[in-house]
Image (tube, rainbow, N blue to C red):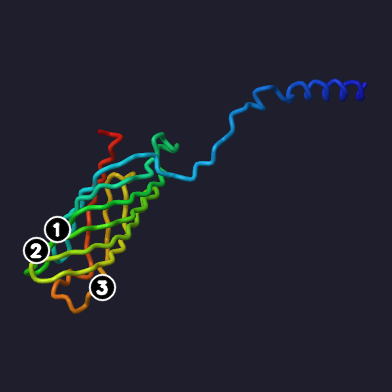
């Protein structure tokens, strides 16, 4: 009796897990090498510590077009930006171009940037790493360092800065 029940169970399960035509669909999954979903935006970022800085940038982003789950808490976003900035440092009023790479994961954020700033008296190259907190990549609060690459320049922005960054993504316009 046990053997007959075992044979019926095996035959019953084999029909349940049998393959169907939908298991062999012609559609192949495509490996997506490019994470950028054609999401662009504008960044507005004032900074202050010992001097005032203001940045406005255009960026491309890897912000997902659909919710990644968990209410977006584990959201991973990358932004690459190109923009203009204004600096009031000491007796210098300077403007310049800025290139940034920003990484946001959940509530943490990091940014690396470089810029070339000029005033009517001198010019400066800077490298600026920043770390901070993020609110789903829309609002970021950074603490950063300025590494002035021209030490003989009279344009010497302070070593530290505090930045509040607002990212406006075009998918919400």
Label for residue 93? 2
Instruction: Classify 10 Å Cα crowding around label 3: few (below 14), some (14-19), many (20 and above).
Output: few
Element type at marker 3? Answer: loop
> Front-most of 142 and 156?
156
Q: Residue furthest bottom?
A: 152
The Cα atoms of the two marked residues, 2 and 1, are separated by: 7 Å
Q: Which residue is mark 3?
A: 149
Q: Which quadrant, please, contains the N terminus?
A: top right
- Residue at the (26%, 54%) spot, across then down: 141
Which comes before the other along the chain, label 1 or label 3? 1
Say which quarter of the image contains residue 96. bottom left
Element type at marker 2? Answer: strand
Say which quarter of the image contains residue 31. top right
Element type at marker 1? Answer: strand
Which comes before the other along the chain, label 2 or label 1? 1
Numbered label tally: 3
Q: In the picture shown, does residue 107 fall above or below 159?
A: above
Instruction: Classify 10 Å Cα crowding around label 1: few (below 14), some (14-19), many (20 and above).
Output: some
Q: In the picture shown, does residue 54 fall above or below 145?
A: above
Residue 106 position, x and y percent, is 39, 48
Label for residue 160? none
Label for residue 86? 1
> Front-most of 56 and 160?
56
Q: Mark 2 and 1 residues: CB-CB less than 8 Å, in contact?
A: yes
- Residue 5 located left or right of residue 41: right
């Amino acid at each position: 009796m046990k053997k007959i029940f075992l044979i019926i169970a095996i035959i019953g399960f084999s029909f349940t897990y049998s393959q169907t035509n939908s298991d062999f669909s012609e559609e192949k999954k495509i490996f997506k090498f490019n994470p950028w979903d054609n999401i662009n935006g504008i960044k507005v970022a004032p900074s202050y510590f010992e001097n005032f800085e203001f940045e406005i940038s255009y960026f491309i982003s890897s912000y997902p077009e659909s919710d990644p789950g968990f209410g977006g808490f584990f959201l991973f976003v990358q932004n690459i930006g190109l923009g203009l900035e204004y600096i009031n440092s000491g007796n210098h009023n300077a403007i310049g171009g800025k290139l940034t790479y920003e990484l946001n994961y959940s509530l943490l954020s990091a940014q690396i940037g470089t810029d070339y700033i000029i005033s009517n008296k001198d010019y400066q190259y800077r490298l600026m790493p920043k770390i901070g907190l993020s609110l789903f990549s829309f609002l970021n609060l950074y603490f950063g360092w300025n590494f002035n690459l021209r030490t003989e320049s009279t344009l010497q922005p302070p070593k530290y800065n505090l930045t509040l960054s607002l990212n406006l993504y075009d998918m919400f316009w």
